[in-house]
Amino acid sequence: MEAWLWSTWRRIVYETRFPAKRGAEIDALAFFADGIRLVTGGRGGEVTVRNIRNGTSGLRLRLHDAVRSAAVDGEGRLLAVQTQAEGESSSRVEVRDAHDGRLLYARRVNFGGGGLAFSPDGERLAALGCCDGGSSIVVWDARAGRELVRPDQQREVSSIAFSPDGRLAGGTRDGGVLLWNARGRPESPPFAAATGTVDPVSFSPDGKLLAASSADQTATLWGLRSRKRLGSTFPIEQGAIPVARFIRNGDLVISYLGNATQWPTRVQRWERFACQVAGRALTRAEWTELLPQRPYRTVCAARPGD
């Protein structure tokens, strides 16, 4: 297995490789909130917590079945792992102490292993079963394992994510996006985001935007209040299905097969980048040509010596 880190708009400066254990296939990746510890899980049933700075390993678990997904709560106390045995149509979710690996509880989910997500406050854990004959979503009390709700599904769901305010979103296999409130009730009619399976979906840190990645090779950005797409689709790389996720500073990172790109989503960051590339402010003539309906203003700060 290989793991990369990325810098803005280009492939990074730092690369590290982690040796595969008990099988080369790695399906589960999850970072702790500190951004230093990474959980990996493979088809051989291994789960390992690694320090990405020095490559050392911490907690190691050996499970019976293939690991399909993993998640860590915001405080780094709970580790959730979803496994699925070969030939089984259901998956098993285990919640463990993230420090010593002690099993706290285990639950079953119908229709396979589709993904896990902790709510931002760490109080709830959502599990998706997909897509062996259907899909199902279950939300538990993260610490006690008590079932809280099973959101009503209007379509077959292929991915899930919590918003910063605790709402739940689901990408569907027919290209749609569903939204539920904390009680599992649909918030509004689904909206079409793509023509293929949507996986994953990701909320911006302020909860105003949602990124949808699809098997039709598109990655798009949506305003949740308007339910409208912002701009056009992001660049497509032939032969690669994009995976778009927001990071803490609000930028959107889109990874492809062997590279990734970081896109700012705030006007101020675009302005800074444009000024960095141009090395100067627009002249009045350039401004009039590019922005004829807007009054001229100086966007780029003058550099020493200008």
Image: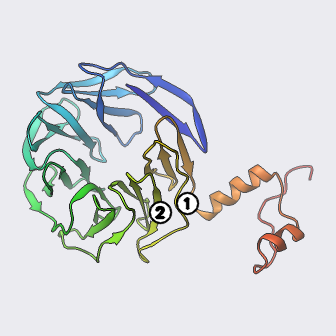
Residue at screen point 27% across, 58% down? 173
User: Toward the viewer: 128 or 297?
Assistant: 128
Residue at screen point 43% across, 51% down? 245
Would residue 266 appear left or right of 84 to someone viewing this image? right
Q: In the rendered image, which quarter is residue 48 located in? A: top left
Above or below: residue 54 compared with residue 184: above
Q: In the rendered image, which quarter is residue 123 located in? A: bottom left
User: Toward the viewer: 114 or 134?
Assistant: 134
Q: Amino acid at mark 1?
A: Thr
Could you give the CA–CA distance between mark 2 and mark 1, rounded to whole angstroms? Answer: 9 Å
Would residue 266 appear left or right of 255 to someone viewing this image? right
Above or below: residue 186 compared with residue 119: below
- Residue 79 lies, in percent from the top left, at 22, 39
The residue beneath circle 2 is 221
Mark 2 crowdedness (10 Å alpha carbons): few <14, some 14-19, many ≥20: many
> Residue 265 shows which numbered tag?
1
Q: Are marks 2 and 1 in contact (CB under 8 Å)?
A: yes
